[in-house]
Image: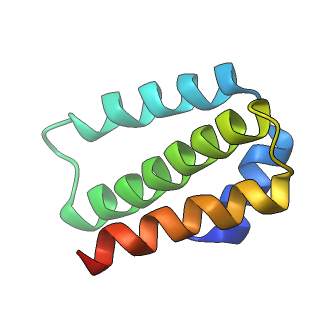
Amino acid sequence: MKLPVIRQIHSTSSVEEINNTITVLENISEVSSIKEVELDVIGELISNLCGALEVHQLVGEGMTEKDALNAFMKKVLSSIDK
């Protein structure tokens, strides 16, 4: 996950647009001829999109974008440490 990418997605896309993009990427990932490296890229994109959705949710609950991004990354880092 890349925080600048998540910030850009959050800043320029609605929740509906993000959800639609995730659906398209999930459908593409199911094609039998797709290569492993392509699946890795799709997985990274989906991770960033899901991060942006969470940031949208936190902002909707009243956090500033900066605080929401920081809270999200702390959550990710704490889940890795466990």
Q: Furthest-bottom residue in view?
A: 81
Residue 64 lies left or right of residue 79; in this view the side is: right
Q: Look at 62% across and 32% down and name the residue there.
A: 18
Q: Is residue 27 visible?
A: yes
Pick the residue in front: 69 or 29: 69
Note whether 40 is above or below 42 in the view shown.
Answer: below
Pick the residue in front: 61 or 33: 61
Residue 18 lies left or right of residue 61; in this view the side is: left
Pick the residue in front: 38 or 7: 7
State the image coordinates of residue 40 (x, y, percent, origin top left).
31, 63
Note whether 81 is above or below 40 in the view shown.
Answer: below
Residue 66 lies left or right of residue 36; in this view the side is: right
Question: Splitting the image into 4 quarters, where does residue 7 fall?
Answer: bottom right
Q: Look at 42% across and 60% down and name the residue there.
A: 44
State the image coordinates of residue 68 (x, y, percent, origin top left).
72, 54
Q: Furthest-front residue in view?
A: 62
Q: Look at 35% across and 54% down and name the residue there.
A: 43
Image quarter of the C terminus: bottom left
Note whether 10 is above or below 8 in the view shown.
Answer: above
Question: Splitting the image into 4 quarters, where does residue 41 fall?
Answer: bottom left
Question: Splitting the image into 4 quarters, where does residue 54 fall?
Answer: top right
Residue 69 lies left or right of residue 22; in this view the side is: right
State the image coordinates of residue 34 (x, y, percent, origin top left).
22, 49
Q: Is residue 1 visible?
A: no
State the image coordinates of residue 56 (x, y, percent, origin top left).
71, 37
